[in-house]
Amino acid sequence: MPARPVLRIGHPTLGRPAKAVTEFNTPQLHTLIADMLDTMMVKNGVGLAAPQIDVPLRVVVFGVEDNPRYPGREPVPMTVLINPIIVPVGDERVADWEGCLSLPAMRGWVPRHRQILYRGFDADGQPIERNVCDFHARVVQHECDHLDGILLPQRIVDMRRFGFEKELFADVPADGNADADTEGSVTQKPVSPTAAPQNPAQNSPENRCSNDDFRDDP
């Protein structure tokens, strides 16, 4: 399937809430998902939401594994997630650099919930439920924001940490700490601020994230 053009910030579709999918396992839905995956791969992203290719439906795709453009990041399984619901687990938030295919060559320092439970459906209408944290949780939150008409600048607290990557990282040495952001390419990451203290409840068995033990409901 062909890759589709990605809408850029300012396009009205990106600012509107998307509609729920009501029919699963249809040729139209499978075509959309194939086009989204092809577009994500061509753009070297780790995620894409349907509104980014001008389809106002609640569909996201994401995933990364052994990608040289994302060194040091834990693998995220290739996933099609439809009509997602996100539930934060605990109160801990962490900030990190994010990019977006709809904001080419730009980066922002975005706080997100460290751990989440997300639910939704695959293309066949089968339920998905996962408890995840860190990069996986960040990717899901970023992509699902698109379904509510929210782009990363709306999540930034300090706008001094938002801009074009060449300007933001101009003073970082070439051998600095390379890191990959959410949708875009690898950037040079400055030393991040001290992380917030961990909530002891995060380590309780019922709240432990399962990035290494993905479970989809039958």
Image (cartoon, rainbow, N blue to C red):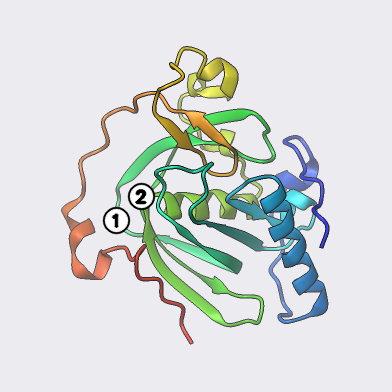
Q: Is residue 164 visible?
A: no
The residue sitting at 16% across, 54% down in the picture is 200
Residue at image point 68% right, 32% down: 104
Quarter-of-image position of residue 82: bottom right
Report crowding for label 2: few under 14, some 14 to 19, many 20 or more residues within 10 A (C-alpha).
many
What residue is at 59 percent from the left and 67 percent from the top? 81
Question: Can residue 160 be seen at all in this image of the molecule?
Answer: yes
Q: Report which quarter residue 101 is drawn in.
A: top right
Disc 1 designates what residue?
A: 90
Query: Would you call the spot at circle 1 few (<14 residues within 10 Å), some (14-19), or many (20 or more)?
Result: some
State whether residue 173 is above or below residue 62: above
Left-right relation of 95 to 45: left
Mark-to-mark CA distance, 1 and 2 = 8 Å
Give the structural element (helix, strand or loop) at label 2: loop
Q: Quadrant of the N terminus?
A: bottom right
Instruction: Identify the residue under disc 2.
Output: 114
Secondary structure of the residue carrying numbered label 1: loop
Q: Nearer the viewer, residue 2 or 164?
A: 2
